[in-house]
Amino acid sequence: MTAVAINHLFGLPETIEKLILPISRSGEGNHESRDSSNNIPIDILESSKEYIFYLDIPGVSKSDIQVTVEEERTLVIKSNGKRKRDDDGSEEGSTKYIRLERRLAQNLVKKFRLPEDADVAAVTAKYQDGVLTVTVGKLPPQPPKPKTVQIAVS
């Protein structure tokens, strides 16, 4: 499978998501934008044995992250966690943010269509130092099976 075809498969759900979800304008309303999950950095690597997804999700608890494989070979990564903030604003002289750029999506949902050679039974995930690593094994290549064609007699 070519790199272009793989990129197309991995990016299809995100493309659909961008078309469906409204685009939020930065600086309006809450610090958390509705589609801020599209801003979460992700790297996808392919080796001969596996696909590896790296997502930066700093400041959340491992228990707040869910990784599932749904119908149609879709890898779903969700996080409902909130990052602990250092400003409480409850008493005089307390600290407060004057600039907040390192935001985290409150309800992160990332979906990726897995290629046909992905082994959905061999998915593992680990969360360390704010980076979620999801590894999806590959199925061994299947040799093409010859097909016998019946010849019709007329």
Image (cartoon, grey):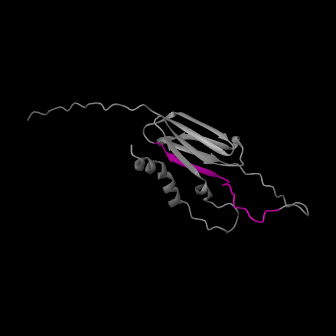
The percent position of residue 50, horizontal first and vertical second, equals 50, 36
Q: Residue furthest right?
A: 92
In which quadrant will I find the N terminus?
top left
Which residue is more in the foreground, 108 or 5? 5
**Span of residues in magenta:** 96-114
**Residue 67, picture quadrant:** top right
Left or right of 39, for residue 50: left
The percent position of residue 89, horizontal first and vertical second, equals 85, 61
Which residue is more in the foreground, 3 or 106? 3
- Residue in the image at 51% along x and 47% along y: 112
> How many discs mark residues in the rendered view?
0
**Residue 29, picture quadrant:** bottom right
Is residue 91 placed above or below 12 in the rendered structure?
below
Is residue 35 placed above or below 112 in the rendered structure?
below
In which quadrant will I find the C terminus?
top left
Which residue is more in the foreground, 107 or 144? 144
Left or right of 98, for residue 127: left
Is the stretch drawn in magenta largely helix, strand or loop?
loop
Q: Is residue 136 magenta?
A: no
**Residue 151, picture quadrant:** top left
Q: Is residue 99 magenta?
A: yes
Q: Residue furthest left?
A: 154
- Residue in the image at 40% along x and 48% along y: 5
- Residue in the image at 41% along x and 50% along y: 4
The percent position of residue 37, horizontal first and vertical second, equals 61, 55
